[in-house]
Amino acid sequence: MTDQVVDIRALKPDLSPERISRRYAAERRFRLYGLVAIAVAIFMLALLMVVIVSKGYSAFVQTHILVEVTFDREVIDPDDTNDPEVISQANFRGIARGAIRKMFPEVTSRRDRRQLYRIFSSEIDFQLMRMARDDPSVIGTTRQVWLKAGADIDMLTKGFIDRDVPESNRRVNDKSLGWYDRLDEQQLVSRRFNTTFFTAADSREPEQAGILGALVGSFLTLAVTLVLVFPVGVSAAVYLEEFAPKNKWTDIIEVNINNLAAVPSIVFGLLGLAVFLNFFELPRSAPLVGGIVLALMTLPTIIIASRSAIMAVPPSIREAALGVGASHMQTVAHHVLPLALPGMLTGTIIGMARALGETAPLLMIGMVAFIVDIPGSITDASTVLPVQVFLWADAPERAFVERTSAATLVLLVFLVAMNLAAILLRKKFERRW
Amino acid sequence: MMRKSFVLAAAAVTVAFAGAAEARDQIRIVGSSTVFPFSAAVAEAFGKSAKFKTPVVESTGSGGGMKLFCAGIGVNHPDITNASRRIKKSEFEKCKAAGIGITEVKVGFDGIVLGSSKKARPMSLTKAQIFLALAHKVPRNGKLVDNPYKNWSDIDKSLPKTKIEVLGPPPTSGTRDAFVELAMEGGCKAVPAAKALGLAKKKCHAIREDGAFVEAGENDNLIVQKLEANPAAVGIFGFSFLDQNSDKIQGARVDGVQPTFDNIASGKYAVSRSLFFYVKQQHVGAIPGIKEYVNEFTSEKAWGPDGYLVDKGLIPLPDADRKKVMTSARGLAPLSM
């Protein structure tokens, strides 16, 4: 004990106005830092959204040209069978080209005609074929049909092609421009909703490319991930939290789970390649393998989230259950698990949202690929949404620029929806003690 | 609910193993990202017209594709690999060791362009100037020194007085491989002082790391966008990107030759490379459609001067070569090295 005793009553607080105003200023500054940080974050987010939306919105419409098409019975279905098989074999290419020629009778040379056909998408044959096959009553009639324009003309109507640059440097030459302007004057050009974007898979022709293949691929992959990760993650969390003895081994497991959560995702891809493809010989590019790899990647996140959800259940509940004679197993199954479930689901959804946005591990197992067929099962070759964005971003055709942004937009919509679901679930079922 | 999930998972895994053991009815193609758009276009046309499923085309890079291709025979290994360079001797040996017989198909050319924004003055470079602008070490006063050139005009008075700022692909890219081999090594040979100091072949490949050369990533679209924003910069990318963006970007002359379709096709433009694909002979017949795919790729409507691949930016082989390659490809002539 020292003999110096300070009489605290003698210490007068410094209540000078300068000091008080300094303290208030410090607080204001501190609040300002926080506000600035949030403002920067919101600005960045807004910038990202503005850039993506402004670049991508035009991909949701597609230029179409109104053409008078004669569905000649002689050509399509001479025996009047209305058999889809017969109709789909017919020469719709000839019908489409005949209709185009009729609009421009003055174009006669072979070279010019080839160029003329290029105003339209190469898909118009299929477009007409589907029309006739789905509704045989059009056969034998002449109809006004909105035919899809080619990607270059589409870029022209959307204003991405500058008319003022010299002809040699333009994707659309003067002749095509003249034809297009004539169609435009007759009001035969219109921009309509781009259904292809939502009903087709990838294509090398921008106007025929869509995201459905990638969307289905993402869905199948995430389904595999969920089926694997949820039961395993929850069981691991329940065991570690409720049953495991606290010793060196569980400590090691715990450290490892936390470390695994921080491992770069490409490492899981390498693991997938070595174990599932090379050793188990599972098919390449399949959602099955993608799902397993992403399950391994999200497993630690889900175990951690589930453990904290279980931890949040107050001990009094457990003690009450045990007190009235419930077994340990009954306590967990009847009381702890139902109360922790909303937290676990939230963690799972957030983990799945991360898996949805992942490309790196999928690169190694062959899901970065050009796939035209929409996958029908988890062993079919498929790709996923972020990979589709990546592939389109690398394509030279200008029309893929807007599609890249549009696909990003769709991906963002799904991510936001999943996160929103997590928040709503928590809001609805969360219980506070 | 949890028991159900377990059963589902077990079922999924069983189905997968059963599926893997089955034969494959879909062609699998891997390899170069440069050949990828052409290969994908052929695959799409092939899938639309023929009675086969559309092949799956992966973009793994030339080297990665070769590794997968030469790993073995069987449904788990790809049938075809694309390459933006010829197969290496070492890769060929590896394939041979695995018992794989290869057919080589040369499909066309790709020019590598030094482009800049239309807002900038058009450039005309020689290979020697490209080398001097980008090499890590250049000869000066009889010694090898770290590249001292800051402006283009430091190299030659005729060049613009702007800072040397070149955006190019990273070393993992096939475009970079071809660029250093054709432009840098070629330029090296044209500088007598470099030869005298022992700079030859691989030694010429080193690119300066002082900020004048910027690795802009594998994505050529990004390089094009950056050039638009920065008229002083020069970018290195494939010809198809110049072709698609010719309203905004211009190509520099190399040794006096403009990078145009005709000049690359005739071989006048020197910085161009050949594109290939390789077929695994053992898979022909075992996997349905390989022969038909090769036929589609080597048909005039695909790779001919008016074919759909030309629209996608492929520069076709001369007529005589096309005929020769077509016969050897359709006959599945084995490659020997």
Image (tube, rainbow, N blue to C red):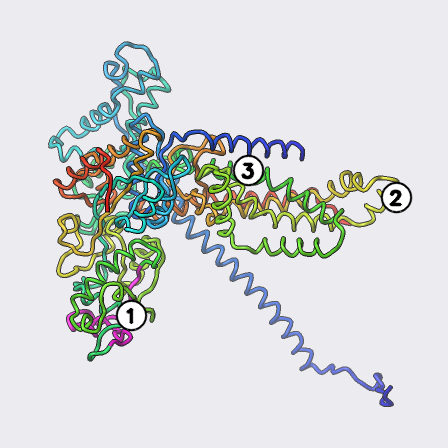
Q: Position of residue A283 (x, y in %)?
A: 46, 37
In this view of the protein, which residue sits in the foreground, B227 or B181? B181
Looking at the rendering, which quadrant does residue A21 occupy? bottom right
Q: Check the image and report above or below for A78 versus A70.
A: above
Specify the label residue B136 is tagged with. Answer: 1
Specify the label residue A323 is tagged with. Answer: 2
**Would you say residue B144 is visible in this rendering?**
yes
**Would residue B165 be counted in the magenta stretch?**
yes
Quarter of the N terminus of chain A within the rendering = bottom right
In this view of the protein, which residue sits in the foreground, B49 or A155? B49
* Label 3: which secondary element: helix
Part of the protein shown in magenta: B144-168
Q: Position of residue A35 (x, y in %)?
A: 57, 64
Q: Residue type at mark 1: give it.
A: His
Q: Position of residue A421 (x, y in %)?
A: 60, 42
**Would you say residue A402 is visible in this rendering?**
no
Looking at the rendering, which quadrant does residue B284 occupy? top left
Callout 2: 10 Å neighbours few (<14), some, many (20+)? Answer: few
Q: Residue type at mark 3: give it.
A: Val
Looking at the rendering, which quadrant does residue B143 occupy? bottom left
In this view of the protein, which residue sits in the foreground, A277 or B28? A277
Asked if marks 1 and 2 touch (Cβ < 8 Å), the reply is: no
* Label 2: which secondary element: helix
Specify the label residue A224 is tagged with. Answer: 3
